[in-house]
Image: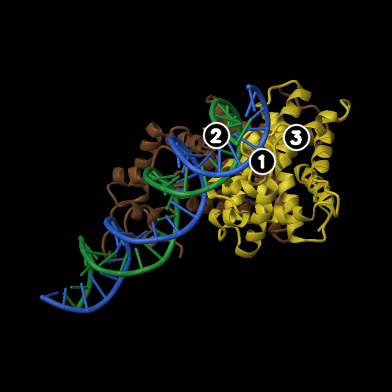
Chain colours: A yellow, B brown, C green, D blue
DNA sequence: GTGACTTTCCGCACTTGGTGCCAATACTGT
DNA sequence: ACAGTATTGGCACCAAGTGCGGAAAGTCAC
């Protein structure tokens, strides 16, 4: 049986009716507590018992909010993913496919500078912790599926044909390469890196030596 | 402390001198036993105790041959990787970088038709089992590092610069897309799919509609 | 207020992967 | 026989994750 989050809602119950025992915590509270502990003990050095204690809740309850310890840093990614899908769908139909995908990826990674101060920390944790790197492919697969579905629709082919598969895999590849550098160079602009990655790839594939050093 | 394989050798001790207690098993024996069990119970349904019993060895000993259960299906990937590195290094210097990388990737995946009958089963297991998909990124990272190092050398830049990172990520992306289809279509030619993937990507990036359907 | 109902919490027991420790084992060489 | 050496593997232990079931804490009807 798959553990479901209480009522599927994050902060409390979905607005009105409050039947049954009230929730003891929320996704937000768990994530804040967890990141606080990760910062001082590292991811591996933080046990679920510690997180449960910090939140003030039973260990067993954590599994009702997150399927696994690895899922905590990802937060509520399903929400984010739905937004990504909408972004792609809202793009004008006459936009070339490669342009549409590129723009969607850019806007997906467009965080208002000050708005999400924890975003960098979250991404650093996800991208630099081996256990989480590994776990993340499962999230990436969902992200890729969104792109593959879009490409498949625009080209009138199946989502599991070669082209949609290639485009989604390569889009992820570019994003990961950009993120990697972004984490290493705190002053770099993520969107600029994504652009550069694509330009570099084009030059590489056509046999031209890329411009920048 | 990192657990080391006994003497670092696979079948028995490295040829001549045999000091100390002789080994009780080998990587090959463990893999054969493991795959036998995976076939009937699935990966998750096979415990390390079962594998140890099948091999006729203590559970503790398994960890001297493989760092984790997830590592067993990968076999001795470090060996394979060394070959990959050599292939790249042996390619003529005047070959364009993209051509060199493409050829190396092709030859890396060039298994004599009958020679490796278990290869498909191994890849199917790795690519279709969620736990293994996740674990595999750690192996992929090593593979990518080989490509990144090559690209960096040929371009005279650092291995962590954007271009090497992009090329290695994209090479992996193409390979994964090709493998995905190869597993779904047993009669497909893996090398052909790799070629098609690259052709499709080129067309996509330049805004041309790809040829095939 | 009492009782029925509903939903979440959470403790308990258990399985499994993984690690540290260390004595037992089984060879070689003198 | 005895020292030397490397592997084996049992034991204790930790942490993640799951199934189960009762306790807790609300709402609602009366």
Q: In which quarter of the image is the N terminus of chain B?
A: bottom left
Residue B148 in the image, given as x and y percentages of width and height: 66, 54
Discs 3/1, front: 3
Query: Dot 3 corresponds to which residue?
Result: A15
Which mark, residue A140? Answer: 1
Question: What secondary structure is marked by label 1?
Answer: helix
Q: Nearer the viewer, residue B78 or A67?
A: A67
Question: Which quarter of the figure has residue B64?
Answer: bottom left
Tell me if mark 2 has few (under 14), some (14-19) or many (20+) residues whose alpha carbon lies within 10 angstroms of its own.
few
Residue B198 visible: no
The image position of residue B115, as x and y in percent, is 43, 36
Mark nearest the camera among 2 and 1 is 2
User: Does label 1 lie on the same chain as label 3?
Assistant: yes
N-term-proximal mark, 3 vs 2: 2
Residue B94 got which mark?
none
Circles 3 and 2 on the same chain:
yes
Image: A167 above or below A26: above
Q: Mark 3–mark 2 contact, CB under 8 Å?
A: no
Q: Mark 2 points at which residue?
A: A2
> N-terminal of the two: label 3 or label 1?
3
Mark 2 touches mark 1? (CB < 8 Å): no
* Residue sitting nearer the eye, C4 or A210: C4
Q: Can residue A188 be seen in this view?
A: yes
Helix, strand or loop for disc 3: loop
């Amino acid at each position: 049986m798959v553990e479901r989050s209480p009522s599927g809602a994050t902060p409390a119950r979905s607005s009105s009716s409050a039947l049954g025992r009230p929730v003891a915590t929320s996704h937000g509270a768990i994530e804040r507590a967890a990141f606080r502990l990760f910062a001082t003990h590292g991811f591996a050095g933080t046990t679920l018992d510690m997180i449960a204690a910090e939140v003030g809740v039973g260990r067993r309850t954590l599994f009702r909010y997150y399927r696994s310890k690895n899922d905590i840093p990802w937060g509520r990614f399903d929400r984010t993913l739905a937004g990504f899908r909408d972004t792609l769908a809202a793009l004008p139909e006459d936009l070339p496919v490669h342009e549409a995908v590129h723009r969607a990826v850019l806007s997906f990674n467009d965080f208002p500078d000050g708005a999400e101060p924890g975003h960098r920390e979250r991404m650093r944790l996800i991208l630099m912790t081996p256990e989480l790197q590994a776990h993340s492919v499962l999230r990436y697969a969902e992200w890729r599926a969104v792109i593959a579905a879009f490409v498949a629709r625009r080209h009138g082919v199946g989502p599991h044909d070669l082209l949609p598969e290639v485009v989604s895999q390569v889009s992820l590849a570019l994003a990961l390469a950009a993120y990697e550098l972004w984490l290493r160079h705190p002053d770099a602009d993520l969107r600029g890196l994504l652009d550069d990655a694509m330009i570099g790839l084009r030059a590489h594939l056509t046999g031209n030596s890329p411009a920048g050093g």
